Image (cartoon, grey):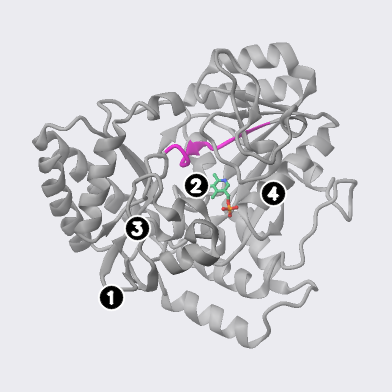
Amino acid sequence: MARACRVIPGGVNSPVRAFRAVGGTPRFVQRAAGAYFWDADGERFTDYIGSWGPMILGHGHPAVLEAVEKAARDGFSYGAPTEREIALAEEVIKLVPSVEMLRLVSSGTEAGMSAIRLARGATGRDQIIKFEGCYHGHADSLLVKGGSGLATFGHPSSAGVPEDLVAHTLVAEYNNVQELEALFQQHGKRIACVIMEPIAGNMNFVRASVEFTRRCRELCTQHGALLIYDEVMTGFRVALGGAQSVYARSIPGFEPDISMFGKVIGGGMPMAAFGGKRTVMEQLAPLGPVYQAGTLSGNPIATACGLATLREIQQPGFFEDLTRKTHRLVDGLMAQATKAGVPFSADSEGGMFGYFFLPELPRNYGQVAHTDMARFNRFYHGMLQRHVYLAPGLYEANFMSAAHSDADIDTTLAAAGEVLRAL
Ligand SMILES: *Cc1c(COP(=O)(O)O)cnc(C)c1O
């Protein structure tokens, strides 16, 4: 870490890896296989972050490895179209009915930036609504925090972002229907889009309520704004059809206008995408006036990795088994916490889960922030000492993979029991 800090700011290439939230020194990973990774000291950890979601099959799945090796031999990048890009778009369109056309990019950040430009271009409007605690990548206009009190125009949440660049971003509380209605009432005709995480994984794990989801859709339709679902984390992770398919069970016909994907879609390679209704997507260059491009977009190795991953997760029973294991872990954690007399709540969908040292599940960022941080960090380090690698921060989600066995879950639960009793 000391060597890293001399040449890389904070020693890491993405801030959360530095362990600032939980304290201590991050583990440097040497290699990974299945449900485990080994650090530079040769210690083995059970991995519940899986690269923050992409490794849904576990590390080094044979079918994915084979696809990547074969693709690598055929060349790393061409800057010209390939058949696998078509196959990947076809696969996503098959799995997510709201998507009629898709464009590939290289990161979730790019997907978010492009989706918003597209929404603005397609509607001819400038303002956007985002929710406090949702993360959509680090594009300038999305690095905002709300003012105090009622929903309002945001202020930059990062240095280096001019006030002018967030002047069109309205920030509202997640799951707050009244606030959203008030925003639309005041600004309706100027709002290009609402962008949201349908299950927010960047404030641990917070579901949008069915009522909130329904009103987001209705208000957008009513005011001619587009609804953008950021499924970078939830896509192909909480269900084959993403979080939108989960909400469609309660709200018949429910669909967003634009969806963003990342993480699982690349299977661990730098790939992401955004897609949606044909009429909207046709606004993109070279067909339409909205410019968007990328030298490595649709990279042949990334598409091979993503396609192989998407094919594996469609095996019969894949999500049933993944969901069963996640439930087993989450239910087990709750039982251990109850036994230890520790206030605790947890939730999950498919292969994504979150837990809180709160008696009830939070519904928005402010409630998540009420968690006893010291207790969270003691739990985190207790688990790390026992070789269980959970997300190093209160605002992060956790992930199950197909490679985790019931024995791995038992070991994790035994460790959690010890740590919770000592809290
Ligand atoms: C990870 C994430 C992003 C950003 O993706 P990057 O590939 O890290 O740029 C955007 N939105 C959500 C919901 C995410 O979880």
Disc 3, disc 2: CB below 8 Å?
A: no
According to the picture, the residue beneath numbered tag 4 turns out to be 275
Report whether the residue tagged 2 is closer than 8 Å to ligand 1. yes
User: What kind of residue is marked 4?
Assistant: Gly
SS of the residue under disc 2 = loop
Residue at image point 72% right, 64% down: 297
Q: Is residue 358 left or right of residue 335?
A: right
Question: Which dot marks residue 25?
Answer: 3
- Circle on res. 105: none
At 70% from the left and 25% from the top, the residue drawn is 221
Residue marked by disc 1: 42
Pick whichever of labels 4 and 2 is earlier in the sequence.
2
First of labels 2, 1 by sequence position? 1
Amino acid type for the residue under numbered disc 2: Thr
Few, some or many C-alpha atoms within 10 Å of disc 3 (few <14, some 14-19, many ≥20)? few
Q: Disc 3 or 1, which lies upstream in sequence?
A: 3
Which mark's residue is nearer the viewer, 3 or 2? Answer: 3
